[in-house]
Image: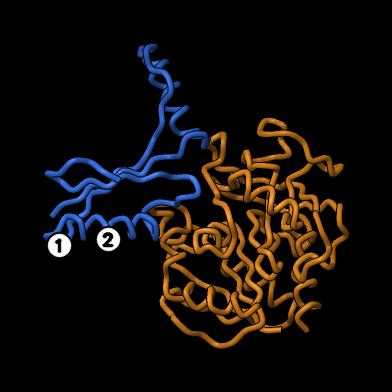
Chain colours: A orange, B blue
Amino acid sequence: MKAAVLVFPGSNREGDVAQALELITGRRPAMVWHGDGDFEKTDLIVVPGGFSYGDYLRCGAMAAQSPVMAEVKRRAAQGVPVLGICNGFQIVTEAGLLPGVLMRNAHLKFVCSDVHLKVETSQSLFTNRYQAGQVIRVPVAHAEGNYFADADTLKALEDRGQIAFRYCAPDGTVDGPLGKQANPNGSINNIAGIFNETKTVLGLMPHPENAVEPMFGGTDGIGLFEGIVEALS
Amino acid sequence: MKARVHVTLKNGVLDPQGKAIGHSLNRLGFPEVGDVRQGKYIELEIAETDATKAKARLDEMCRKLLANTVIENYSIEIVGEQAGQ
């Protein structure tokens, strides 16, 4: 399986995700610069975390209009899987590949810690290595992870099973709003990650790529990458 | 001509920054301050002489980049004209 990792001015997790992909797939991904309107055909496109364009205007807003994202949108429409992590999630929502928006954390603080996530479904190429209801532990690091969508959009996401991950307590309890500590940012319905309708695009705020080696505190992120490899091989 | 764009959060969208500003002002001795909403103000120099055309283009700019209409409203003003959407 060959992956492409996009690189914008201000990206900073592209190396982390490239290393995780190499570790798990055995192949070094192609690093693709934001100004490239075309790039080699790959089985997966990853939009990594960071602070693309310095978070100017809104997080992900400028990157979403870059030449490379026009090509990503074309390929996503053809069914090429796209994984947006953290700032990458913000970019793919701004680009319209996923509904809703990531707003400033409700408590206004940058949050950098491990969180627990409840896997909502195993029925996707991204989550097939997990069980529905399984709790995994991965880190988050963001100031704008407060997912919001209007009531109709939210209902459609819930009804169609497009919620991929929710913030939860270690025992899997998905509790109420901010202050209940399982939700690090005030995200509506504790949403940490969502799919598009065809479940070929996944955006999530947490960093599975930073939970793939025991020496860095956990390996619960491996399943996501292994699942992708299995689905795409 | 010069244009001004105001981008504001829609009603009902939580604005924690506005709330924090309000609290700070209350603490600084301005108890009369109630609800505060923070937005963005953008000034643009437009190479266009027809205000109607400029507004149509600005509307497109707002929808494509300057505002995220999921959570934000915008208003466009041509300098020297009445404010309008």
**Disc 2 vs disc 1: Cβ atoms closer than 8 Å?**
yes
Q: Secondary structure at mark 2?
A: helix
- Per the image, label 1 sits on a secondary structure element best described as loop
Position of residue A7 relative to residue A57, above or below, is below
Give the left or right position of residue A145, taking residue A220 as reference. left
Residue located at (73% from left, 75% from top) = A23
Depth check: A101 or A173 in front?
A: A101
User: Residue B74 appears in which quarter of the rendering?
Assistant: top left
Q: Residues within 10 Å of mark 2 (few under 14, many from 20)?
A: some
**Subunit of label 2:** B
Residue bearing the label numbered 2: B57
Q: Position of residue A135 (x, y in %)?
A: 83, 51
- Relative to residue A105, is residue A61 depicted above or below? below
Q: Position of residue A40 (x, y in %)?
A: 55, 88
Which of the image's four quarters has the N terminus of chain A? Answer: bottom right
For residue A148, above or below residue A44: above
Residue at 52% x, 61% y is A91
Residue B37 occupies which quadrant of the picture?
Answer: top left
Mark 1: amino acid: Glu
B28 and A63: which one is in front? A63
What residue did someone put label 1 on?
A: B48
Q: Could you tell me how far apart the alpha carbons at marks 2 and 1 are, in whole angstroms?
A: 10 Å
Read off the chain for label 1: B
Mark 1: give few (<14), some (14-19) or many (20+) Cα within 10 Å. few
Left or right of residue A157, residue A53 in this image: left
Q: Which mark is residue A7?
A: none
